[in-house]
Image: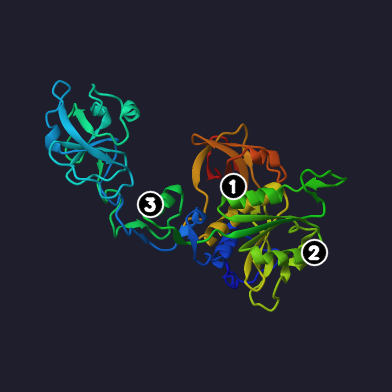
Amino acid sequence: MSSAAPRTTGHPPVGPDRLWSVEEHLEDILATVRPLEPIELNLLDAQGCVLVEDVTVPVPLPPFDNSSMDGYAVRVADVAGASEEFPAVLEVVGDVAAGQADPSPVGPGQAARIMTGAPLPPGAETVVPVEWTDGGLGEGPVSGMRARAQAPEGAEGQVRVYRPAEARAHVRAKGSDVKAGDRALAAGTVLGPPQIALLAAIGRGTVRVHPRPRVVVLSTGSELVQPDEELGGGQIYDSNSFALTAAARDAGAIAYRVGAVADDAETLRDTIEDQLVRADLMVTTGGVSVGAYDVVKEALAHVGDEDEPGGGVEFRKLAMQPGKPQGFGSVGPDHIPLLALPGNPVSSYVSFELFVRPAIRALMGLADVHRPTTRATLAADKPLTSPKGRRQFLRGGYADGAVTPVGGAGSHLVAALAHADALIVVPEETESVEPGAEVEVILLG
């Protein structure tokens, strides 16, 4: 299943020192990524997916007139003027249960005991709740629970009705929810629990959607150790692959985490080639800045079919902080898109939010791929500083129209990231933001 077209960037060739803007890099990614080919899925497998065609209602919902209450199906004239002093006394001719077909008709002076969801029997015009009756017990008005507990199953006899009922009271009319031929859901709808409920209610067991993309996440670095293992000298735990795998799932993808790969070009290339079979998108973290740069570049330049045009990964410098070094391209004969992110935890997460998450949402066929943004008042004790020519993304906590910086600007501050639910955006031309100023905020929650 191909998820990307051969890459052709609209930007002119540039040297290695050229700074790309955030918009240019994202534009290049979104111009390459294509929604996944539609497939037919069972309803629960389609949760979170996007419909690719309108769904028309084949049968009305509900498909027949039915009772919305436990009570008695009666004719309106037979209970007109009924009161506690002068109740209407009707002959109970039988029971109508939910799922029952062809119930017996109700004639003048008659009533049928009816359950919630049961079809309205022929001749009946309204439903009297059991609480308005004696429950067929020959006593005063009783609660529905008491009536159901005391009334003999299938018992016939008489029922006293103590209140009148209007025509069609407590009756769910055929087609009152949706009518046959109506459009139930439009193409482009994201299938959540209510939409899946509607599809099931109109008899659709499968639906045609863009599937959730399969995202493979792997981290690179010989210093990385898996959680629960003992740290050696110079080693750190691999948190990035866990964070990005969780973020990919949160974005709607089916995500697979690959253990950390050592800084070895051949090992990294072999790992990526092995993972291509289950990937619609690949994400790597680490090894894109000075140091391991050449190793990763060598590994990612030719993965899969080297003769396919448009393949390979291009490494760039972006005018942003954190996250200046980035890589993007496609790998393998199917041109699977690959995004290479920095290795610092905050850099990789910010890069995911800005670039990978929109790519995942585009693969899903969603019209809006971006996180919501808003304007907020900066609640800080001192001015925020930002390097000129760089768009800075600072972690923050957003509440009631104000945003408070969380932690510092360091790209290694994982603890601060864990307490942030927003990114404060400082534009490239701004070097200082005073407390109380209005700033742009990307909401992560």
x and y, in percent, of residue 364 in the image: 52, 59
Is residue 322 in view?
no
* Eye-nearest disc, 2 or 1: 2
Give the number of the disc on residue 430.
1
Looking at the picture, which amino acid does disc 1 mark?
Thr
Per the rendering, the mark at residue 267 is: 2
Task: State the colouring used for the structure image.
Answer: rainbow
154 versus 275 height, above or below: above
Relative image position of residue 282 (x, y in whole percent): 65, 61
- Image quarter (top left, top right, bottom left or bottom right) of the N terminus: bottom right
Which callout, 1 or 3, points at the residue further toward the start of the chain? Answer: 3
The answer, for residue 399, to whether it is visible in the render is: yes
Q: Secondary structure at mark 3?
A: helix
- Which residue lies at the image location 66% right of the left edge and 77% below the top edge? 308
Look at discs 1 and 3 and give the one toward the viewer.
3
Name the foreground residue: 59 vs 414: 59
Instruction: Estimate the x, y position of residue 437 in percent, counting from the top left.
Output: 53, 38
Please provide percent x and percent y for residue 117. 32, 43
Q: Residue furthest right?
A: 233
Measure how far apart labels 2 and 1 are at the Cα level: 43 Å
Mark 1 Cα-neighbour bin, 10 Å: few <14, some 14–19, many ≥20: some
Q: Nearer the viewer, mark 2 or mark 3?
A: 3
Disc 3: which residue: 201
In the rendered structure, which disc, 2 or 1, sits on the residue that comes first in sequence? Answer: 2
Local SS, label 1? loop
Q: Secondary structure at mark 2?
A: helix
Give 215 or 318, whichever is nearer the viewer: 215
Amino acid residing under circle 3: Ala
| Tag 1 near tag 3, CB within 8 Å | no
Give the residue type that dot 2 points to: Thr
> What residue appears at the point 25 percent right and 26 percent down from the top-left corner?
137
